[in-house]
Amino acid sequence: MSANAEQAMQLEADFLAGVEYNLHAAEGGLLRGSIWQTARLDDEDRLRALLAENRTYDRQRLKTLPANRRLALHGYEKRFFFGRRRTGVAIASVMSPLAALVRTPEEAGPAIGLGELHDHVNKLMGDVTMSHVIGVCSTTGFTPQAREAKFNIPKVSVVLIEPDGQGGWRVHAAGDAVDERLVKLFDPEKESDKVDRARALIASYSADLLTGSLAASAVAKEANLPEHLVRKSFRQLASSDAELRLVDRDGQLLMYRGASGERAEKKSMNMMDKIKQLFSGEGDETEKINLLAERRATLSQRRDRFYDDIAKLEKKEAELIEEGKNAKSEVPRRRIAAQVAQLRKDIARHNTTGAMLNQQINIISTDIHNLTLIKQGELAQLPDTEELTSHAVEAEEMLESLKADADMVGGLEAGIEQTLISEEEMAILKEFEKDDTGSETIAIPPSVITPPQSSTRVASDSPPITTDSEPDAPDSPDARKVDPEPS
């Protein structure tokens, strides 16, 4: 994995934090010594010089770049009363291509080569007569030559660490006699984090569980994790999900999705009952679904292996065709042509087998689907036709009764409204209809302004009430006409 400056700085911090915890936990045990001193070093001075060469004088820039930090733990043992003797040193060091990251911080830095790795390890070693445990982490990865380096130095154990690009680390010994326990000391990822990462990868392949299965070995290979941790993740997921099932076939742990339900122990059944159930076609649908799902999981793994073999044969065929094109004489071309012809026959046979497995998986999936529908229908416990009809009639009667009650309440409210309003309130309401100019602006509903019949009548000799809404027009013909007085 190649990382830019920001990623390299984060990887540096994550590596040192995780390894420091592991080294302190091993003090007095795997790392011999009763007294320990911790030293922290870095290449910050060199980093400042590189920034100055590139005419970058921003101090905040230092906080965004890795500094090739190192952590050294020196162990001692008490000797006599006041003396002590050195027992060894454990070093966790980080390597990043500082010059390249300073020039182009946004671009991925180059991998560490074999020469740089040798120089760095030689610089870290002090007294060669004392035991050294050295872990070198490259934030931008190692070249293939550096990754295969062997440091077979007496009393020196070298471990190489690099990010794997999937949130984990690739940790391996750079020597033939390195204790595996020392290799684990320089793995900054905790076991719980690895299990969580495996579970996240399994969740991303949840669609494969619907029609097939998932193998623990395949997940371990893709996630760069030990298979026993992936198996642990499988068991945790299966215990938390009632539909997930596990089966171990030929040393291969498979996970597939079966029928939901509690995992109850199978009841003992005599031979006669088994024969009756076999020929009657009756039985527990859940058990049948789980059995068919297990068969489908096994077939899907076999089909995937055939497809992998086909891919390998096709790759071999392409290599032979390229070799035949480059051949100059007729003899090797005829030999290669015969090999290609045989490979194509093998590919055709594998394709035929894969098609047959697909048909078998399809048949089993159809049967699982039908059994699932039957099981779901039994769980629903739907009402029959008589119950549905009876409930519909009761609901209709209830709605009609509710409608009649609502109409009656509406009539009562209208009567109450007409009864409660008084003649004085109606006059005030008519005053509300007028604005400052004397014109009416608000219309009063007839049900409100009509006085109730039970109210007291106004005296005949009282002056009539006139409104400004209908003033007499002086220019109208009726207004100019005056009756003559009798002579």
Image: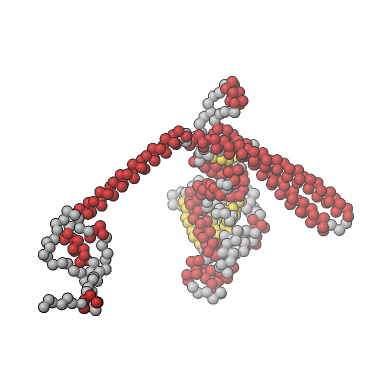
The answer to whether any part of residue 201 appears in the image is no
Q: Quadrant of residue 352?
A: top right
Query: Quick one: 353 or 44, which is closer to the camera?
Result: 353
Q: Residue 96 location in percent, x, y?
A: 57, 63
As drawn, the residue found furthest toward the right would be 330
Q: Is residue 3 above or below residue 398?
A: below
As drawn, the residue found furthest toward the front would be 487
Q: Is residue 44 above or below residue 346?
A: below
Q: Residue 315 location in percent, x, y?
A: 74, 52
Quarter the N terminus occupies = bottom right
> Could you tell me which residue is drawn at 12 percent across and 61 percent down?
459
How many numbered markers are drawn?
0
Left or right: 236, with 116 as reference point? left
Q: Residue 6 location in percent, x, y?
A: 53, 64
The answer to whether any part of residue 378 appears in the image is yes
> Could you tell me which residue is drawn at 70 percent across and 43 percent down?
355
Colour scheme of the rendered structure? secondary structure
Q: Residue 420 location in percent, x, y?
A: 19, 54
Quarter the C terminus occupies = bottom left
Query: Quick one: 209 or 283, which is closer to the camera?
Result: 283
Query: Quick one: 156 or 128, which is closer to the camera?
Result: 156
Left or right: 390, with 74 as reference point? left
> Could you tell me which residue is drawn at 45 percent across and 33 percent down?
386
> Could you tell me which residue is drawn at 50 percent across and 53 percent down?
18
